Image: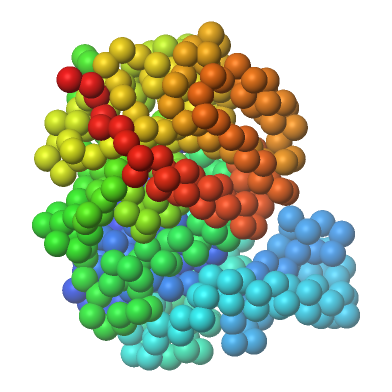
Amino acid sequence: MLFSNRVDAGRRLAQRLHRFRGQDVVVLGLPRGGVLVAFEVALELGAPLDVIVVRKLGVPFQQELGMGAIGEGGVRVLNPDVVRIANVSDADIDAVEQRERVELVRRADRFRRGRPRVPLEGRVALIIDDGIATGSTAKAACRVARALGAGRVVVAVPVAPTDWTTQLAADADELVCLETPENFFAVGQWYADFSQTTDDEVVGCLERAAACELGPSAPGRARAVSGAAMDDLMGIDREVSVHAGPVWLAGQLSVPEQAIGVAVFAHGSGSSRLSPRNRFVADVLNRAGIGTLLFDLLTLDEETDRRNVFDIELLAQRLADATIWLHAQPRARQLPFGYFGASTGAAAALWAATLEGIDVAAVVSRGGRPDLAGPRLSRVSVPTLLIVGSEDDAVLDLNRSAQAMLRCENHLAVVSGATHLFEEPGTLAKAAELSRDWFLHHLNAGGTGPKP
């Protein structure tokens, strides 16, 4: 795999695009996955972030096969070869376009939430996606940017097929790609984590960018917010190295001004501190005045041994070590702590909460496997919230069984319509709101981190 996930790809792409820093640039993500990549680029460049909403036009009898794309402003791009080979009629094309335009308008309204589009007149439109396959959506986005008055159009992606430039050369002034591997079949094959991006994650990126003066709320005066500048704006928001027993682990620490507490995140198997879903939840907590620490539970070498990924006792000890490390940080040492665990990370969070010397005020499990904490469940003494999707049948049953073993204050919240990854519209936001409310109540009530 070339990239861990879209966040990793975005940070690496941002380094290639560093020369655009200081120019009059608008970063435009293609929803949904491209927005996660674009956010990292906008943050690095200190540029405003917006979306160009485009929709693939799928062949009627094979929706995954794109015969073209549409974009805002009435733009339509067709791939004549696909149309000819699939024998698609003009009437069929019009019917597909009509259906997709309804969805395009819905998404544009959903993503911007009433915010005006960032003006493009005379500016550099930096169009970002998580990868190029056929190029139809990127081509449509280029034409939308031109129609909106962009002075220069640049398309930048992490990965694309070797012939990708021939697809877009006529529509973009410049093309940037990190990797063009041979045997390219699909964008997702080059990502370790290419899980579906939700509407809520897109909205979260746009709102976070706007809050950092990177987005539509401050066009023309955007700046990079990092280091000391971020300290001034939000307290602490920086990458950290977490000392956990014999190793140092990469992490991201965010502590808002006047924070009421800090939630330490434990990700699930196959994920990392860069998990877009955990980052979305962390953003919701940060806006509510709750600090967050997202960190890798294992080193890169340790991850190669799959036994470590499911070693709940090891992961729990890493979480406890990170809590002790966090307690030594100046902005956090006086704050109460909580644990937020997803999937196998939930078992680690519950296990860590029972360890001697660790005092946390609350635990939240999202789509968790608390059953993997085994006999430790009956020893958990802190208020525990279990959040599960109503359509995640197997995990829901496991959580009900685990809840019966808990002897502490607890609650099982079932999010209607959600599957295991909370990919359905509004479900991740609901899980984040439940987490926020649980932490707001219980972090205010007590808990001071590790016991002396």
For the residue pair 33 and 206, the one nearer the viewer reads as 206
| Image position of 342 with respect to 118: above or below | above
Q: Residue furthest top?
A: 375
Which percent across, then down, holds residue 16? 28, 57
Which percent across, then down, holds residue 38? 40, 62
* Residue depicted at 84% across the width and 77% down the height: 95
* Residue depicted at 53% across the width and 35% down the height: 385
Report the number of discs: 0
Which percent across, then down, holds residue 25? 30, 76
For the residue pair 215 and 418, the one nearer the viewer reads as 418
- Structure colour scheme: rainbow
For the residue pair 277 and 138, the one nearer the viewer reads as 277
**Quadrant showing the C terminus:** top left
For the residue pair 178 and 167, the one nearer the viewer reads as 178
Q: Is residue 227 visible?
A: yes
* Residue depicted at 51% across the width and 75% down the height: 112
* Residue depicted at 23% across the width and 21% down the height: 451
Q: Is residue 9 left or right of residue 336?
A: right
Q: Is residue 75 left or right of residue 382?
A: right
Which percent across, then down, holds residue 189? 56, 40
Q: Is residue 361 left or right of residue 63?
A: left
Q: Is residue 156 visible?
A: no
